Amino acid sequence: MGALFLGFVLSVFSLFLLLINSILFVSKVKKINNSTYSYVATYLVILFIVELFCNTIGYLYPGQNFYLSHFYFNAQFILLSIVFYRLFKSHKLKKLVILNYVIVTFIILGMYIYNNQLFWQFNLFEIAMTSVLLIIYALIHLSNTMGTKKKYFYLSVGMILYLLCSSLIFLFGNYELVFIEDPYIDIWIFNTLFYIVYQVFIFVEWNYINKNGLDD
């Protein structure tokens, strides 16, 4: 019971941090007037909405909110793909981002059409491919910006750390496997802890942008 309560408290706290970051980013959209920044702000708002529903349904109906993971991962994939598309200077990389998105999205849609029961479960392909591609994009961006202005540096680092942890946990594939019974450990707590770390990096990113501004 203690572990469950701790997990719930951490989850609510991470949701609160996401809300704060969403408000901070949205509050500066007009002032900063940068399209990439606006997509990041949109990403945070949409994720907050999905997380809010996920936490609410998970609390009221434990184990029945798995289908929301599809909205989470796909919203994250499309919005961050747009962000990296805009950050990349190479036309080849831009085309690769578009190609990857189209291919992965069509495969995912095909999987749900072929087996609609998959909608109510974790989709391992969806989790793995969307996360791995975003991690690769973030690593490329970090490599491209070495020695230059830290444009979305903290966001990228936080995202890499979180997605590595999150994807591994989600890839367990079902509710039962994320609990170790003896001793009892809720592995989802680690996911929430890394999500909190991610939110801290996002706040640092906002603070950096707020102080230094952004180039187009």
Image (cartoon, rainbow, N blue to C red):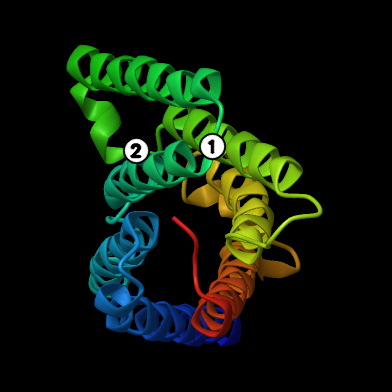
Tag of residue 11: none
Q: Badge 1, how many Cα within 10 Å: few under 14, some, many 20+? A: some
Relative side of 113 to 32, left or right: left
Q: Residue furthest right?
A: 147
For this view, does 165 lie left or right of residue 64? right
Residue occupying the point 68% across, 68% down:
185
Q: Nearer the viewer, residue 162 or 57?
A: 162
Specify few, some or many for label 2: CA neighbours under 10 Å numbering under 14, 14-19, or 20 or more.
Answer: some
List the residue tagged with mark 1: 88
Quarter holding residue 158: bottom right
Relative to 1, is 121 on the left or the right?
left
Sequence-first disc among 1 and 2: 1
Q: Position of residue 168 (x, y in %)?
A: 64, 44
Q: Amino acid at mark 1?
A: Phe
Dot 2: element: loop
Residue ID at (62%, 58%): 162
- Tell me residue 20's x, y (percent): 39, 86
Where is residue 47 shown, x and y percent of the image?
A: 33, 62
Q: Which residue is mark 2?
A: 121
**Numbered label tally:** 2
Amino acid carrying label 2: it is Gln
